[in-house]
Amino acid sequence: MSTVASITVTAEIQRFDPSQDAEPRFESFEVSGLANMSVLDVVRSIYENQAGDLAFQFACRVGRCGTCAVRVNGRPVLACQERCKAQMRIEPLKPFPALRDLVVDRTEIESRLASFELAPLRNNAHPGQPELIAPDLAAKLCHMDSCLLCMVCVSACPAVEERPFDGPAFMLKLRHMAEHPADRRDRLDQALQGGMLECFNCDVCTQVCPADLSPAQAIRDFRRELFFGRGKEA
Amino acid sequence: MATASDIFLEHADVVVAGSGAAGMRAAIAAHDAGANVVLLAKGPRRANHTRMSGGRYNVVSGLNPADGNDAFFRDTIDSGVGINNHELTRILVDEALARAYDLEEYGLAWDRTEADKYYMSMTGGGTYVRTLGSIDEGIGITEVMLHQMHKRGIRICDFHMLTDVIRDGGGCVAGGLVIDLSKGVWRFFSAPTVIIATGGTSQLYETSSGPTINTGDGIAIALRAGAELVDVEFMQFIPISFVYPQGARGYTLTEPAHYGPRHFDPNAEAAQLLNVKGERFVLKHDPLRKEGSTRDVLARAIMLEILEGRGTPEGGVYMVPDPAVFDAFLRERPIYVKRLLENYGEPQARLQAPIQVMPSALYTLGGVRIDRWCRTCVPGLLAAGEAAGGVHGANRLGGSSMPDIQVFGRRAGMAAADDAKAARAPGDAGLEQARARVAELTAPMQRADGVRPTEVKRRVQKLMWDHVGLVRTANRLEESLRAFTDLRENVMPRLKVTNKSRVLNREWMESLELANLLDLAQVMAATSIERKETRGAFYRTDFPETDPDWTANLWVRRESGRVLVEKHAVAGSATPATAEAARVAAAS
C-alpha cells in the first residue's frame, strides 16, 4: 500500500560455513524498504542484492511450510510472519545444529518425530466409510493437525533448555493422537517418556505459536488424564 | 573433502523425486508392494506445494444424492474444455473416494457435520456440492502421510535435488543423478525406476501462489530423458489472490471469501468484482455465471481490466465480499483471516469492506505425458501429480488437485514397484554418464565472472508473466521464444555463483533450477504459438474463439536437442484418433 511508511533496517546476520569457518561470526547489512516488510523480505533482499553467498531457508513465504524459523533478537519466529525491526540480530534456531548460516539441521528432530510412531495404531481396519468421529472432535483434530513442526515453540521453551524435555510441539503431536478415536497406543506414556512433567506450564509455547495452537493446553490435558484418568470413547 | 567429480553410488528399486503428497503416496504404495524406496526432497521435506493447499478434496461421497460419478466426470471434462485425457479423468473420479478414506485411515479427520457425515461445499467450476474440507488441511494431509512414511521406515533424503534421470544403452532408466545440497556432494541412485513427483512450475511467473521450490525440475528432467510432455501451454491462474504485502503477493485467497453464499448453494451468487470505475466487468465475459464462473474466465477478466488501465494503482481489482459467510470463512480458513487482518485491516478480515485482489500463477495443467499407470514412454520413468499432465485438460476444477495426487501417486508407486521387479538391477550402468553430467552442472561454480542466476530468473519471470501468461498473442510469443533461446545460448554459459562453498549454496541450486525453468519456458512459448485458438486457461488475443479443430492435445518431445511439437487427438474420447505431426519448433 502506498500509505505504508518506509524503514531502514540494520540486520546483523550470523554467518557460519562449517567447511570454511571455525567459529560463527556476525555480518551487518542495511536494507531499506516498506515498514511492513517481513524478516524474510529483509533476508531475501540481502541475498538478492548484497550477499549471494547467504544460506537461508524458506519455501511458502505465507506461514504454512514452517521451514523459515530463525531467532530475531533472541526470540524464535517464523521469518515470513514476523515484521522487521530497525535493529535485528538474526540467528539460526536454537538448540539445533546449524548446517550453514541461518539453516539448521533437522535430522534429529525428524528421527524424534518418527520414534513417536504418530500414525494411529488401529485395532480394526478403517471401515471403508466415514469413520465415526463427533464433529467437534473432528474440528479439534483438524486444528491440532495444523501444527507446522516449525520448532519455534521448542526453541522458546525454557524447560527444553534446562530439563530433559522433548518440547511442546512433540507433546501437541502426541496429544493429537491421544484425542484420535481410532488410536490405541498409550500416548500418555509416550508423553511421560518425552519429559511432559518437566514443563513449567509457563505458556510461552502458546504465545509464540505461528499457527495459533496451544501445546501448553495439550500438556495440561495429558496431566489431567494422568491424575484423574480418562475414559476413551470406543 | 569431496571434489567436484566424486559421486557416491547408492541403490534402490524405486527413486521418488518430490516430497509433496504425490511423492509420498507413491513411496507408500511402492513400499507396500515390496519395493526398496528412497524419497528425495529438494528442501526440507515440508517445503512442498501440497502443504500450501487448503486441502479441499473433490469426491462423490454419496452424501449429496443429486451428485454422481458421471456428473463429476462431466464437470471435469467441461472445465477442461474437452481436452482432458478421458481415461485419466475417469480414474480420478472413480478412485477419489477410496483415497479419501486412505487419508482418514492415516489419521486425517475430514471436517464433519455429523459423526458419519462429511462437511461439504462448492469449489471453482463445480456444479454440485461435493468438496470435502477440513480446516486448512494441506498441512494435515502432509503430516499424516509423513507419519505413514515413518511407520514404514521409508528413507527420506532432505536437501536432495534430482538433476537428471540417466538411461542405459537400451534407453531404460538406470537411475537418478542427485545433488545433496546440504553437503554439496553428488549421489547416483542406481535404480530401474524413477517417479517424477516434483510438482509444477509456477515459479516461471513473476506473481505466483506456490512455493519457491516449484521450478518444474522434474518436468524438464523428464523431457531431457526422452519423455513426452502434454498440454504444457496451459497454466492455471487463480483469479483471487493477495495483492500485498509484497512478500505474499500472489498467494491464493479464494473460496469461501470469494464464493460467498455460493459456497454452499450452486444457485447463489459469488462476491462481486469491481474495477476502479466501480464497473462489474465480469458481466462482459460471463453474463450467465457471473462471478461464480470458472477460474480461467475470472482470472482473464481481471487481468484484462488491469492491462487496460482499470485496475488499482497496486495492480488489482476490488472484490466485494459477503459478511454473511464470515463464520464459514473463519472456520475453514483461520489463517487467511489472520493474514487479511495483518495486511488489509479488520473490516476486510471480517469481509465487511472491499478487498484488493489479483490473479496469480497457481497450477501447471500440463506436464509429463503418462498412461493410466503413470508410465511415460521411457521404460522405468513414471510421473504423478502436478508434474504430470492430462487429468485436468485446459482448466482444473478447484478441489481436484488433492484427489489427483492421491489417486495417481498411488498408481505410480504400484506400477514402479512392478516394473522394478521385472527389471534387471542396473548396477553402475549410467555412472559414467552421470559423471560427465556432473562436470556440466558444476561449471557455474568454476566461473569467476558472469551473471547471477537470480538476475536471469527475474528476466524469465517477467517475460513469462507479460507474454506467456494470461493474455498471449503471436508476435509477443515469438519475441519471448527468441529471448529464451538467446538466454539459453548466450547467458546460461556465463552463469556464475558468488560463493564457491559447496554447503547449501543457494545460487548454485538456483543455477540448476534456472536451466529447468528455461527449458520449460521454451516449450511453453513454442506450444502457445502452435495453439491458434482460445480454450480454458489459454487465451490468445489474435485467436479469441475456441476452435473445435483444436479439441486436441499438443505433445512435446526432444530429439537431438531439438524440440518437436505434435498435435494429437484427445486420448480416450469419442473423437477418432488422427495424430498429426504439426511442426518442428525452435532448436535449442
Image (cartoon, coloured by chain):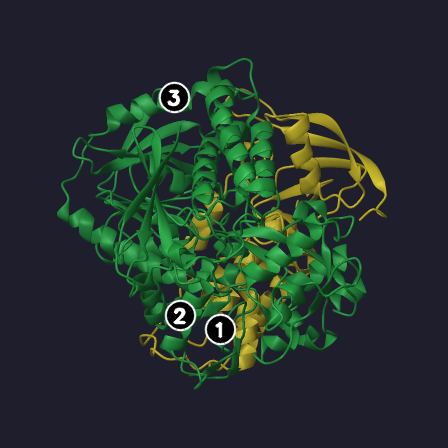
Task: Tell me where residue B414 sits by quadrant.
Answer: bottom left
Q: Which chain is displayed in green in the rendered image?
A: B
Tell me how far mark 3 sits from mark 1, CA to CA: 47 Å
Q: Nearer the viewer, mark 3 or mark 2?
A: 3
Under tag 1, what secondary structure?
strand
Seen in the picture, residue B285 relative to A62 is either above or below; the reply is below
Q: Amino acid at mark 3?
A: Glu
Q: CA–CA distance between discs 1 and 2?
A: 9 Å
Earlier residue among tags 1 and 2: 2
Mark with earlier residue (3, 2): 2
Q: Which residue is mark 1?
A: B132
Q: Tell me the tag on residue B100.
A: 2
Q: Chain of mark 1?
A: B
Q: Is residue B51 found left or right of A204 in the rendered image? A: left
Q: Do the CB atoms of the residues marked 1 and 2 lie less than 8 Å apart?
A: yes
Give the residue type that dot 2 points to: Ala
* Residue A126 in picture, x, y percent from top left: 34, 75
Compare residues A45 and B69 and report the one nearer the observer.
B69
| Residue placed most toward the observer, B194 or B41 | B194
* Residue at numbered disc 3: B440
Residue at 26% across, 50% down:
B375
